[in-house]
Amino acid sequence: MTRRGFLSGAATGFRAAGERRLRITRVRAVPLRVRGEAAAGPTERKSLPDTDPARWRQFGPFSQLTGAILVEICTDRGIIGYGMGGGGTAACYIIEHHLSELLAGLDPLNIQMIWDQLFASTSFYGRRGVVVMALSGIDLALWDIAGKHAGKPVHELLGGPTRENVPGYYTGNDIERGLKLGFRGVKISGFEDARRGRDGARRAVERILESRKRTGPEPLLMIDVLSAWDVAYTLDVAERSAEAKLHFIEEPLLPDDSEGYARLCREVHSTRIASGEHEATRFGFQELIRNRAAHILQPDITWSGGLTECRRIAAMADAAGLPLVPHRGGSVYGMTLLCTLRGQTLAESFGTGDSGNQIMELLTPQLEKGCYLPPKGPGFGVEFSDAILRKYAPGLL
Protein backbone atom coordinates (compact mmCIF):
# COMPACT_ATOMS: atom_id res chain seq x y z
CA MET A 1 0.00 0.00 0.00
CA THR A 2 1.26 3.47 -0.81
CA ARG A 3 1.72 6.01 1.98
CA ARG A 4 -1.09 8.09 0.52
CA GLY A 5 -3.39 5.08 0.42
CA PHE A 6 -2.34 4.10 3.94
CA LEU A 7 -3.44 7.47 5.28
CA SER A 8 -6.54 8.01 3.17
CA GLY A 9 -8.34 5.06 4.77
CA ALA A 10 -8.45 6.84 8.13
CA ALA A 11 -11.93 8.31 7.76
CA THR A 12 -13.62 6.76 4.74
CA GLY A 13 -15.85 3.78 4.14
CA PHE A 14 -17.49 3.78 7.57
CA ARG A 15 -20.97 4.77 6.37
CA ALA A 16 -23.33 3.02 3.97
CA ALA A 17 -24.53 4.95 0.93
CA GLY A 18 -27.44 7.21 1.84
CA GLU A 19 -27.13 6.51 5.56
CA ARG A 20 -28.05 9.32 7.93
CA ARG A 21 -25.06 10.93 9.62
CA LEU A 22 -24.23 10.34 13.24
CA ARG A 23 -23.89 13.36 15.51
CA ILE A 24 -21.87 13.84 18.69
CA THR A 25 -24.16 14.80 21.56
CA ARG A 26 -21.85 14.72 24.59
CA VAL A 27 -18.13 14.55 25.40
CA ARG A 28 -16.78 13.88 28.87
CA ALA A 29 -13.38 13.03 30.33
CA VAL A 30 -12.45 11.85 33.82
CA PRO A 31 -9.32 10.48 35.52
CA LEU A 32 -8.95 6.73 35.00
CA ARG A 33 -7.66 4.85 38.02
CA VAL A 34 -5.41 2.49 36.09
CA ARG A 35 -3.23 2.25 39.17
CA GLY A 36 -3.83 3.24 42.74
CA GLU A 37 -0.56 5.15 42.86
CA ALA A 38 -0.36 8.87 43.54
CA ALA A 39 2.41 11.36 42.88
CA ALA A 40 4.56 12.42 45.80
CA GLY A 41 2.81 15.19 47.70
CA PRO A 42 4.23 18.44 49.06
CA THR A 43 5.13 16.87 52.42
CA GLU A 44 7.22 14.17 50.75
CA ARG A 45 9.00 16.68 48.52
CA LYS A 46 9.78 19.04 51.39
CA SER A 47 11.30 16.22 53.40
CA LEU A 48 13.96 15.60 50.73
CA PRO A 49 17.30 17.44 50.81
CA ASP A 50 17.62 20.12 48.14
CA THR A 51 20.02 18.04 46.01
CA ASP A 52 18.45 14.63 46.57
CA PRO A 53 18.39 12.73 43.22
CA ALA A 54 14.71 11.91 43.81
CA ARG A 55 13.87 15.59 43.22
CA TRP A 56 14.67 15.04 39.54
CA ARG A 57 12.08 12.22 39.44
CA GLN A 58 8.95 13.98 40.78
CA PHE A 59 6.66 13.45 37.79
CA GLY A 60 3.46 14.80 39.29
CA PRO A 61 -0.21 13.83 38.82
CA PHE A 62 -0.38 14.51 35.05
CA SER A 63 2.34 12.12 33.91
CA GLN A 64 2.60 8.42 33.11
CA LEU A 65 -0.23 6.13 34.24
CA THR A 66 -0.93 8.34 37.24
CA GLY A 67 -2.39 10.80 34.71
CA ALA A 68 -4.50 8.32 32.72
CA ILE A 69 -7.92 9.59 31.64
CA LEU A 70 -10.98 8.01 30.06
CA VAL A 71 -12.84 9.94 27.35
CA GLU A 72 -16.49 9.15 26.70
CA ILE A 73 -18.19 10.36 23.50
CA CYS A 74 -21.95 9.84 23.05
CA THR A 75 -23.88 10.01 19.78
CA ASP A 76 -27.47 10.69 18.80
CA ARG A 77 -28.00 7.01 17.97
CA GLY A 78 -26.89 5.63 21.30
CA ILE A 79 -23.40 4.53 20.24
CA ILE A 80 -20.86 5.40 22.92
CA GLY A 81 -17.12 5.41 22.34
CA TYR A 82 -14.42 5.19 24.99
CA GLY A 83 -10.77 6.11 24.62
CA MET A 84 -7.83 6.19 27.00
CA GLY A 85 -5.66 9.29 27.09
CA GLY A 86 -3.27 11.00 29.48
CA GLY A 87 -2.63 14.30 31.18
CA GLY A 88 -4.80 13.80 34.26
CA THR A 89 -7.19 16.47 35.44
CA ALA A 90 -5.35 19.06 33.32
CA ALA A 91 -6.29 17.18 30.15
CA CYS A 92 -9.86 16.72 31.41
CA TYR A 93 -10.12 20.48 31.93
CA ILE A 94 -8.95 21.16 28.36
CA ILE A 95 -11.52 18.71 26.98
CA GLU A 96 -14.33 20.14 29.11
CA HIS A 97 -13.58 23.82 28.47
CA HIS A 98 -12.39 23.75 24.85
CA LEU A 99 -12.43 20.55 22.85
CA SER A 100 -15.92 19.36 23.81
CA GLU A 101 -17.36 22.57 22.36
CA LEU A 102 -15.55 21.97 19.06
CA LEU A 103 -16.85 18.40 18.90
CA ALA A 104 -20.52 19.12 19.61
CA GLY A 105 -22.75 18.21 16.66
CA LEU A 106 -19.95 16.81 14.47
CA ASP A 107 -20.13 13.50 12.62
CA PRO A 108 -17.82 11.24 14.68
CA LEU A 109 -16.96 9.14 11.62
CA ASN A 110 -14.96 12.02 10.10
CA ILE A 111 -12.08 11.03 12.34
CA GLN A 112 -9.07 12.36 10.44
CA MET A 113 -10.77 15.70 9.74
CA ILE A 114 -11.67 16.06 13.42
CA TRP A 115 -8.10 15.26 14.48
CA ASP A 116 -6.72 17.94 12.18
CA GLN A 117 -9.28 20.49 13.37
CA LEU A 118 -8.58 19.86 17.07
CA PHE A 119 -4.82 19.90 16.61
CA ALA A 120 -4.93 23.17 14.67
CA SER A 121 -7.27 24.72 17.22
CA THR A 122 -4.94 23.88 20.14
CA SER A 123 -1.61 24.53 18.44
CA PHE A 124 -1.14 27.98 19.98
CA TYR A 125 -1.00 26.44 23.46
CA GLY A 126 -0.48 22.73 22.82
CA ARG A 127 1.37 20.74 20.13
CA ARG A 128 2.63 18.10 22.60
CA GLY A 129 2.28 17.03 26.20
CA VAL A 130 -1.04 17.39 28.00
CA VAL A 131 -3.02 18.73 25.02
CA VAL A 132 -1.99 15.90 22.68
CA MET A 133 -2.64 13.38 25.46
CA ALA A 134 -6.18 14.76 25.68
CA LEU A 135 -6.53 14.61 21.89
CA SER A 136 -5.32 11.00 21.96
CA GLY A 137 -8.19 9.94 24.21
CA ILE A 138 -10.70 11.72 21.99
CA ASP A 139 -9.31 10.12 18.85
CA LEU A 140 -9.49 6.63 20.33
CA ALA A 141 -13.08 7.20 21.46
CA LEU A 142 -13.97 8.22 17.89
CA TRP A 143 -12.38 5.06 16.48
CA ASP A 144 -14.29 3.03 19.07
CA ILE A 145 -17.52 4.59 17.78
CA ALA A 146 -16.54 3.84 14.18
CA GLY A 147 -15.91 0.18 14.98
CA LYS A 148 -19.12 -0.20 16.95
CA HIS A 149 -21.08 1.55 14.19
CA ALA A 150 -19.69 -0.90 11.64
CA GLY A 151 -20.00 -3.89 14.00
CA LYS A 152 -16.31 -4.67 13.46
CA PRO A 153 -13.01 -4.48 15.34
CA VAL A 154 -11.20 -1.24 14.53
CA HIS A 155 -8.34 -3.12 12.88
CA GLU A 156 -10.82 -4.39 10.27
CA LEU A 157 -11.53 -0.75 9.37
CA LEU A 158 -7.79 -0.33 8.76
CA GLY A 159 -7.73 -3.12 6.19
CA GLY A 160 -7.52 -6.09 8.54
CA PRO A 161 -4.61 -7.80 10.29
CA THR A 162 -1.45 -8.53 8.34
CA ARG A 163 -0.37 -11.13 10.92
CA GLU A 164 -1.98 -13.57 13.31
CA ASN A 165 -0.15 -12.24 16.37
CA VAL A 166 2.67 -10.01 17.58
CA PRO A 167 5.51 -11.20 19.86
CA GLY A 168 5.25 -9.65 23.31
CA TYR A 169 7.84 -8.59 25.83
CA TYR A 170 7.40 -8.14 29.57
CA THR A 171 8.07 -4.82 31.27
CA GLY A 172 8.92 -5.38 34.91
CA ASN A 173 11.81 -6.22 37.20
CA ASP A 174 10.56 -9.70 38.09
CA ILE A 175 12.42 -11.38 35.23
CA GLU A 176 11.44 -14.93 36.15
CA ARG A 177 7.76 -13.98 36.26
CA GLY A 178 7.93 -12.42 32.81
CA LEU A 179 9.55 -15.49 31.30
CA LYS A 180 7.11 -17.80 33.12
CA LEU A 181 4.23 -15.92 31.47
CA GLY A 182 5.74 -16.92 28.13
CA PHE A 183 7.11 -13.58 26.93
CA ARG A 184 9.92 -13.52 24.36
CA GLY A 185 11.87 -10.90 26.28
CA VAL A 186 12.04 -8.70 29.37
CA LYS A 187 12.60 -4.97 29.88
CA ILE A 188 13.81 -3.83 33.28
CA SER A 189 13.86 -0.34 34.77
CA GLY A 190 15.15 1.53 37.83
CA PHE A 191 18.40 2.90 36.36
CA GLU A 192 18.35 6.29 38.05
CA ASP A 193 21.82 6.44 39.62
CA ALA A 194 23.39 8.80 37.07
CA ARG A 195 23.57 11.60 39.62
CA ARG A 196 25.71 9.34 41.79
CA GLY A 197 28.53 9.31 39.24
CA ARG A 198 30.74 6.36 38.42
CA ASP A 199 29.47 4.35 41.35
CA GLY A 200 25.99 4.56 39.84
CA ALA A 201 27.33 3.49 36.44
CA ARG A 202 29.11 0.53 38.01
CA ARG A 203 25.90 -0.62 39.68
CA ALA A 204 23.98 -0.22 36.40
CA VAL A 205 26.47 -2.40 34.51
CA GLU A 206 26.47 -5.03 37.26
CA ARG A 207 22.68 -5.16 37.23
CA ILE A 208 22.51 -5.51 33.42
CA LEU A 209 25.03 -8.35 33.39
CA GLU A 210 23.31 -10.09 36.31
CA SER A 211 19.95 -9.76 34.54
CA ARG A 212 21.35 -11.42 31.44
CA LYS A 213 22.47 -14.37 33.56
CA ARG A 214 18.92 -14.64 34.90
CA THR A 215 17.30 -14.58 31.45
CA GLY A 216 19.75 -16.90 29.76
CA PRO A 217 21.10 -16.18 26.26
CA GLU A 218 17.92 -16.46 24.18
CA PRO A 219 15.24 -14.03 25.49
CA LEU A 220 15.52 -10.40 24.50
CA LEU A 221 16.77 -8.12 27.27
CA MET A 222 16.08 -4.38 27.26
CA ILE A 223 16.48 -1.57 29.79
CA ASP A 224 14.31 1.51 30.33
CA VAL A 225 16.28 4.47 31.69
CA LEU A 226 13.32 6.88 31.86
CA SER A 227 15.48 9.80 30.69
CA ALA A 228 17.79 9.70 33.73
CA TRP A 229 21.20 9.61 32.00
CA ASP A 230 23.34 11.90 29.85
CA VAL A 231 25.35 11.11 26.71
CA ALA A 232 28.69 10.30 28.37
CA TYR A 233 27.05 8.11 31.00
CA THR A 234 25.08 6.19 28.35
CA LEU A 235 28.17 5.61 26.20
CA ASP A 236 30.07 4.32 29.23
CA VAL A 237 27.34 1.92 30.40
CA ALA A 238 26.63 0.68 26.86
CA GLU A 239 30.28 -0.14 26.26
CA ARG A 240 30.84 -1.90 29.60
CA SER A 241 27.62 -3.95 29.35
CA ALA A 242 28.11 -4.98 25.70
CA GLU A 243 28.41 -8.67 26.54
CA ALA A 244 24.80 -8.65 27.78
CA LYS A 245 23.69 -8.05 24.17
CA LEU A 246 20.88 -5.66 25.05
CA HIS A 247 18.19 -5.45 22.41
CA PHE A 248 17.80 -1.74 23.11
CA ILE A 249 18.29 1.03 25.65
CA GLU A 250 15.06 3.00 26.01
CA GLU A 251 14.96 6.75 26.61
CA PRO A 252 18.40 7.30 28.14
CA LEU A 253 18.17 11.10 27.69
CA LEU A 254 15.54 13.80 28.15
CA PRO A 255 13.12 13.77 25.20
CA ASP A 256 14.25 17.13 23.76
CA ASP A 257 17.95 16.24 23.58
CA SER A 258 17.79 15.42 19.88
CA GLU A 259 21.48 16.17 19.33
CA GLY A 260 22.42 13.85 22.18
CA TYR A 261 20.24 11.05 20.82
CA ALA A 262 21.79 11.51 17.38
CA ARG A 263 25.26 11.13 18.87
CA LEU A 264 24.23 7.97 20.72
CA CYS A 265 22.82 6.52 17.50
CA ARG A 266 26.16 7.21 15.79
CA GLU A 267 28.46 5.98 18.55
CA VAL A 268 26.67 3.13 20.35
CA HIS A 269 27.36 -0.13 18.51
CA SER A 270 26.59 -2.77 21.14
CA THR A 271 22.82 -2.15 21.13
CA ARG A 272 20.13 0.14 19.73
CA ILE A 273 18.66 3.36 21.05
CA ALA A 274 14.88 3.55 21.39
CA SER A 275 12.89 6.74 21.92
CA GLY A 276 9.52 8.37 21.35
CA GLU A 277 7.38 7.35 24.32
CA HIS A 278 7.24 11.01 25.33
CA GLU A 279 7.27 12.46 21.81
CA ALA A 280 4.09 13.64 20.12
CA THR A 281 2.57 13.77 16.63
CA ARG A 282 4.13 13.16 13.25
CA PHE A 283 5.94 16.48 13.50
CA GLY A 284 7.93 15.38 16.54
CA PHE A 285 8.72 11.98 15.05
CA GLN A 286 9.67 13.61 11.78
CA GLU A 287 12.44 15.40 13.67
CA LEU A 288 13.63 12.17 15.28
CA ILE A 289 13.81 10.57 11.84
CA ARG A 290 15.40 13.58 10.15
CA ASN A 291 18.08 13.89 12.85
CA ARG A 292 18.67 10.12 12.94
CA ALA A 293 18.03 10.35 16.66
CA ALA A 294 16.50 6.88 17.23
CA HIS A 295 17.05 3.35 16.01
CA ILE A 296 13.57 2.33 17.21
CA LEU A 297 10.48 4.56 17.44
CA GLN A 298 8.15 4.15 20.42
CA PRO A 299 5.00 6.29 20.19
CA ASP A 300 2.34 5.72 22.82
CA ILE A 301 -1.07 5.60 21.13
CA THR A 302 -2.74 7.05 24.22
CA TRP A 303 -0.25 9.94 24.46
CA SER A 304 1.30 10.66 21.05
CA GLY A 305 -1.88 11.57 19.16
CA GLY A 306 -4.14 8.54 19.13
CA LEU A 307 -4.59 5.95 16.41
CA THR A 308 -5.05 8.52 13.63
CA GLU A 309 -1.68 10.15 14.27
CA CYS A 310 0.17 6.94 15.11
CA ARG A 311 -0.86 5.54 11.72
CA ARG A 312 0.85 8.55 10.15
CA ILE A 313 3.90 7.97 12.34
CA ALA A 314 3.92 4.29 11.35
CA ALA A 315 3.90 5.24 7.67
CA MET A 316 6.86 7.57 8.23
CA ALA A 317 8.76 4.89 10.16
CA ASP A 318 8.12 2.39 7.38
CA ALA A 319 9.39 4.84 4.76
CA ALA A 320 12.53 5.46 6.84
CA GLY A 321 13.14 1.75 7.46
CA LEU A 322 12.82 2.12 11.25
CA PRO A 323 11.06 -0.40 13.50
CA LEU A 324 7.95 0.80 15.34
CA VAL A 325 7.71 -0.67 18.86
CA PRO A 326 5.00 1.39 20.61
CA HIS A 327 5.03 2.06 24.31
CA ARG A 328 2.36 -0.22 25.82
CA GLY A 329 1.83 -1.90 22.47
CA GLY A 330 0.28 -4.84 24.30
CA SER A 331 -2.87 -2.85 25.04
CA VAL A 332 -5.99 -3.17 22.89
CA TYR A 333 -5.12 0.23 21.41
CA GLY A 334 -1.53 -0.63 20.58
CA MET A 335 -2.35 -4.05 19.18
CA THR A 336 -5.03 -2.56 16.92
CA LEU A 337 -2.24 -0.74 15.11
CA LEU A 338 0.51 -3.35 15.41
CA CYS A 339 -1.50 -6.19 13.92
CA THR A 340 -1.97 -4.15 10.71
CA LEU A 341 1.72 -3.25 10.16
CA ARG A 342 4.05 -4.93 7.68
CA GLY A 343 7.46 -4.72 9.36
CA GLN A 344 8.89 -6.51 12.38
CA THR A 345 7.65 -5.22 15.71
CA LEU A 346 7.16 -6.11 19.37
CA ALA A 347 4.28 -5.50 21.77
CA GLU A 348 5.13 -4.27 25.26
CA SER A 349 3.12 -5.85 28.07
CA PHE A 350 0.25 -3.90 29.56
CA GLY A 351 -1.60 -5.55 32.42
CA THR A 352 -0.75 -9.13 31.48
CA GLY A 353 -0.60 -11.16 34.65
CA ASP A 354 -1.68 -8.17 36.71
CA SER A 355 -4.34 -10.15 38.54
CA GLY A 356 -6.88 -8.20 40.51
CA ASN A 357 -6.62 -5.06 38.37
CA GLN A 358 -9.77 -5.34 36.27
CA ILE A 359 -9.15 -2.28 34.13
CA MET A 360 -5.66 -3.42 33.12
CA GLU A 361 -7.02 -6.86 32.30
CA LEU A 362 -9.89 -5.32 30.33
CA LEU A 363 -7.53 -3.22 28.19
CA THR A 364 -5.18 -6.12 27.44
CA PRO A 365 -5.71 -8.48 24.48
CA GLN A 366 -5.22 -12.22 24.76
CA LEU A 367 -1.66 -13.51 25.15
CA GLU A 368 -0.97 -16.91 23.59
CA LYS A 369 2.47 -18.56 23.67
CA GLY A 370 4.20 -15.23 24.25
CA CYS A 371 2.34 -13.40 21.47
CA TYR A 372 -0.58 -10.98 21.63
CA LEU A 373 -3.63 -11.63 19.46
CA PRO A 374 -5.63 -8.88 17.69
CA PRO A 375 -8.52 -7.54 19.81
CA LYS A 376 -11.92 -9.08 19.21
CA GLY A 377 -15.36 -7.51 19.17
CA PRO A 378 -16.70 -4.23 17.76
CA GLY A 379 -14.59 -1.12 18.31
CA PHE A 380 -11.63 -1.93 20.52
CA GLY A 381 -13.51 -4.91 21.93
CA VAL A 382 -13.81 -3.39 25.40
CA GLU A 383 -17.08 -3.23 27.33
CA PHE A 384 -17.04 -0.58 30.04
CA SER A 385 -19.72 -1.90 32.35
CA ASP A 386 -21.25 0.24 35.07
CA ALA A 387 -19.33 -1.79 37.63
CA ILE A 388 -16.02 -1.06 35.88
CA LEU A 389 -16.83 2.64 35.49
CA ARG A 390 -17.95 2.92 39.10
CA LYS A 391 -14.64 1.49 40.30
CA TYR A 392 -12.14 3.01 37.87
CA ALA A 393 -13.86 6.07 36.32
CA PRO A 394 -16.58 7.04 38.81
CA GLY A 395 -16.94 10.54 37.36
CA LEU A 396 -18.82 9.12 34.37
CA LEU A 397 -21.69 7.69 36.48
Image (cartoon, grey):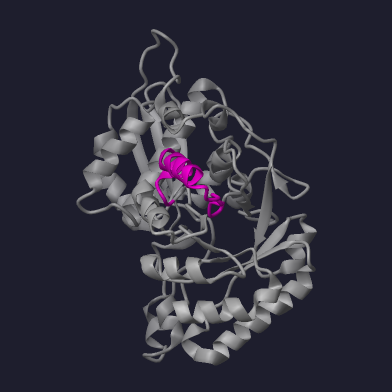
Q: Is residue 226 visible?
A: no
Q: Is residue 209 visible?
A: yes
Is 318 included in the stretch rendered in magenta? yes
Q: Where is residue 387 in the image (x, y as percent from the top left)?
A: 56, 43
Q: Is residue 354 left or right of residue 359?
A: right
Q: Quadrant of the C terminus?
A: top left
Q: Which residue is drawn at 38% across and 7% down?
A: 18
Q: Which residue is drawn at 55% across and 87% down?
A: 200
Quarter of image, res 156: top right
Quarter of image, res 13: top left
Residue found farthest to the top: 18
Residue nearer the viewer, 116 or 290: 290
Residue nearer the viewer, 3 or 88: 3
Residue nearer the viewer, 64 or 212: 212
Q: Where is residue 14 in the image (x, y as percent from the top left)?
A: 45, 20
Q: Position of residue 267 (x, y in %)?
A: 51, 71
Residue found farthest to the left: 124
Q: Where is residue 195 in the image (x, y as percent from the top left)?
A: 46, 86
Q: Residue at x 24, y 42 (%)?
A: 120
Residue nearer the viewer, 91 or 270: 270
Q: How many marks?
A: 0
Give the residues in magenta.
303-328
Is 360 included in the stretch rendered in magenta? no
Residue 202, relative to residue 380: is it above or below?
below
Q: Residue at x 24, y 37 (%)?
A: 101
